[in-house]
Image (cartoon, rainbow, N blue to C red):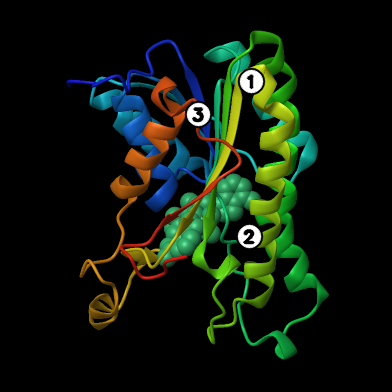
Amino acid sequence: MTRNGLDLSGRVALVTGAGRTVGLGIAEVLAGLGARVAVNDLDPASAEAAAAGIRGRGGEAVAVPADVTDDAGVRAMVAEVATRLGPVDVLVNAAGIPVGAANGQFVDTDRAEWDAWIDLNLYAPMQAAHAVLPGMRERGWGRVLSISSYASRAASRNGLAVYGAAKAGLESFTRHVGLESAPSGITVNAIALGTMSHLRGEPAPPEHAAAIPVGRFGTPEDVGWTVGFLASDRAAWITGQTIQLNGGAYMT
Ligand SMILES: NC(=O)c1ccc[n+]([C@@H]2O[C@H](COP(=O)([O-])OP(=O)(O)OC[C@H]3O[C@@H](n4cnc5c(N)ncnc54)[C@H](O)[C@@H]3O)[C@@H](O)[C@H]2O)c1
């Protein structure tokens, strides 16, 4: 593969929620660019299958199943990655849709549902960043990337109030930590996705693609290549930003 400066050889990447869909696409592209990849997922079987798939295509990957909403589990996972692959250079927070959680109209939800969405979309990326940032600072290089959503800014009738609030918090966290981390050679960015080809494992209704200016849904590869660029040295001057990746569906 011609890497055009996007060579991630020698870098260790940890991708959460990478057993399927967006996280999997990110893990595959990062491995294709030469990174050693730790594939996290709540579901051990999908994490193992994803890592095996990457290895089968000549990449280097290990599975590190864990629940990223468990603080101790996140710290243990980061330590395990350091032992098996090396310290984390690139953290990608992709897990964001809690398994089994409802997303009804706000008035129909309760505190337990709010906690599920906020734990996964805000506290989990914070905890993971907190675990990897000290080492990145010591080494003078790092990338913290978080997958966000258009729902952080655009209101929706689809029951996304708490999810959108959590993603807005994640984007604000990205700006603050980006500013704190910039002098240490660490960039911190978010990527806000529009409607993807799959939601909760199901294909998006084809007729909805017509509302997207470029005429199609986003794919895991679209996200993977954006993450691959932001993870590279070529993107060293981009930090504290939220990149809108949505086929033109939402422009600001
Ligand atoms: N699919 C979309 O249309 C869409 C749109 C905007 C933003 N996003 C964002 O993209 C990201 C990925 O979404 P997706 O569509 O790939 O979701 P998905 O549900 O297809 O995959 C998410 C993966 O995360 C894992 N996961 C869930 N909870 C976890 C936990 N506690 N610990 C570890 N892993 C966990 C799941 O097992 C699953 O394999 C999320 O942050 C989501 O908010 C998705």
For image coordinates 58% across by 56% down, the residue present is 96
Query: Going by the image, does 118 lie left or right of 235?
Result: right
Mark 2 nearby-residue class (10 Å; few <14, some 14–19, many ≥20):
many
The answer to which of marks 2 and 1 sits earlier in the sequence is 1
- Precedes in sequence: disc 1 or disc 3: 1
In the rendered image, the quadrant that contains the N terminus is top left
Residue topped by disc 3: 237
Q: Secondary structure at mark 2?
A: helix
Q: Tell me where residue 193 sits by quadrant.
A: bottom left
Seen from the viewer's position, the closer of residues 230 and 204 is: 230
Q: CA distance from mark 1 to mark 3?
A: 30 Å
| Residue located beneath label 1 in the image | 80
Side of 128 relative to 57 (left or right): right
What residue occupies the far left of the structure in this picture?
1
Q: CA distance from mark 2 to mark 1?
A: 28 Å
> What residue do we see at 36% from left, 70% from top?
249
Inspect the image, locate mark 3, and give the three-letter code of the amino acid beneath it: Trp
Residue positioned 24% across, 83% down in the render: 207
Query: SS class of the residue under badge 3?
Result: loop
Residue denoted by label 2: 167
Which one is nearer the viewer's eye here, 123 or 49?
A: 123
| Residue kind at label 1, given as amino acid type | Glu
Relative to 117, is 123 above or below?
Answer: above
| Kind of residue at disc 2 | Lys
Q: Residue at x 43, y 10 (%)?
A: 10
> Is residue 176 depicted above or below 53 in this figure?
below
